[in-house]
Image (cartoon, rainbow, N blue to C red):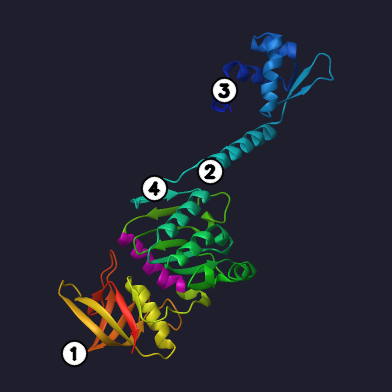
Amino acid sequence: MSESRIREHLGAFGLSTTEVETYLAIVRRGEATTGDVAAAADVSQGYVYEVAETLVDRGLVAVDESASPTVLRARPATEAVAELSTRLSDLQSAIEDVYSEPAATDVGFEVVRSRQTVERRANRFLDDAVHEAFVVVPATSFADLKGAMAAAVDRGVTVYCMLVAPDTGVVADAVDGFGAYAHVVRTWEARPQVIVLRDARAGLVGSHGVLTGRHGDEYAVSFGQPEVANGFYGNMVSNVWPMGEPRHVSAPPALPATFEYFRNGVTAAAQHLDAGRDIVADVTVAGTGSDHQLDLDGVSVREAKQSLVPPVTSSFPVENALVVETESGPASIGGDSPGFDPYFEDFAARRVTLRDA
């Protein structure tokens, strides 16, 4: 690296022009007396002593006062750079301690390369979740997200979680006592993408290494479009979620219960039906592709088509629907979520109330 680049970088670290020239005078020689340095840098010998204190504090030089006259020695390049790197790490930690995340907004696309920033974005999406959250992360990252996950569960958010890692022991330790943090937990001994989705509206997707690696080209993309969020949901529920081993499933809400988010109602219905209960639904539906609404009160729920909790009852991965018995015969109802209209079902709905028959 040329001396001009050294001047540029040391200036960025706050060294004055004279301090940089003094340092260069020492570096060129490896070691030099204060008198030699004063002559080379064109400063007084007394000033060299003052500058030397600054250079010692920065970890750039060492002073040998046992020699007569006093000798200044340049520290090896690796040691000098390591000292500056330590200062940068300290600066990053200090900034993160006082940093206030801007108010949450669902923006277009944002490429994120810092592990700490990916963790903050993941926690933000969990904090913003109202109805549901999907979390696919390395098991080693659970500790960084479990607070936000527990808070989401306490707010009534349905949290689906998959912890992944090549090491079975890491996964097993992470899921111990997991009921406080998620309603459904799966594990997979693999390294799939990191996925965090909330309310079919926003989230992030990134390489596995963005939360496990220290260096490299790993990154994540955060987004705030429902169409994109639902696209990644389809990929997750088709290619990632089925690979996991079920580790925990919370009991469904007691009935009667109203679900403002239809997918949550389907999951709960599937659990009640699997337990052998007869249930009915009160739901306002609209014909698929139309605005005509119809109130269905007390219709018997025959099936819950889904793949999020065992046993899987869907005929294809993203299917999430209730099959109810109407006066005209069986009818299939899908969830009308942002950016994702039902295309296979007869009707669409946004909320549903389930009751014992």
Q: Nearer the viewer, residue 81 or 321?
A: 321
Q: Is residue 40 left or right of residue 268?
A: right
Q: Is residue 91 above or below residue 49?
A: below
Q: Is residue 82 left or right of residue 315?
A: right
Dot 1: what SS? loop
Q: Nearer the viewer, residue 54 or 79?
A: 54
**Mark pair 1, 2: CA separation:** 61 Å
Query: Which residue is under mark 4?
Result: 103
Res 328 label: 1
Identity of the amino acid at label 2? Answer: Glu
Q: Is residue 237 left or right of residue 225?
A: right
Q: How many marks?
A: 4
Magenta span covers which residues?
226-241
Mark sitting earlier along the chain (1/2): 2
Mark sitting earlier along the chain (2/3): 3
Image x and y of residue 104, in percent: 38, 51
Q: Is residue 287 above or below residue 111?
A: below
**Mark pair 2, 3: CA separation:** 29 Å
Q: Residues within 10 Å of mark 3 (few under 14, many from 20)?
A: some
Res 292 label: none
The structure residue drawn at horizontal position 41% and vertical position 71%, both measured from the top left corner, is: 237
The structure residue drawn at horizontal position 59% and vertical position 37%, both measured from the top left corner, is: 88
Image quadrant occupied by the C terminus: bottom left
Identity of the amino acid at label 1? Answer: Ser
> Closer to the observer: label 1 or label 4?
4
Q: Residues within 10 Å of mark 4 (few under 14, many from 20)?
A: few
Identity of the amino acid at label 4? Answer: Ala
Residue 46 lies in what quarter of the image?
top right
Mark sitting earlier along the chain (1/4): 4
Q: Are marks 4 and 3 in contact (CB under 8 Å)?
A: no
> Closer to the observer: label 2 or label 3?
2
Image quadrant occupied by the N terminus: top right
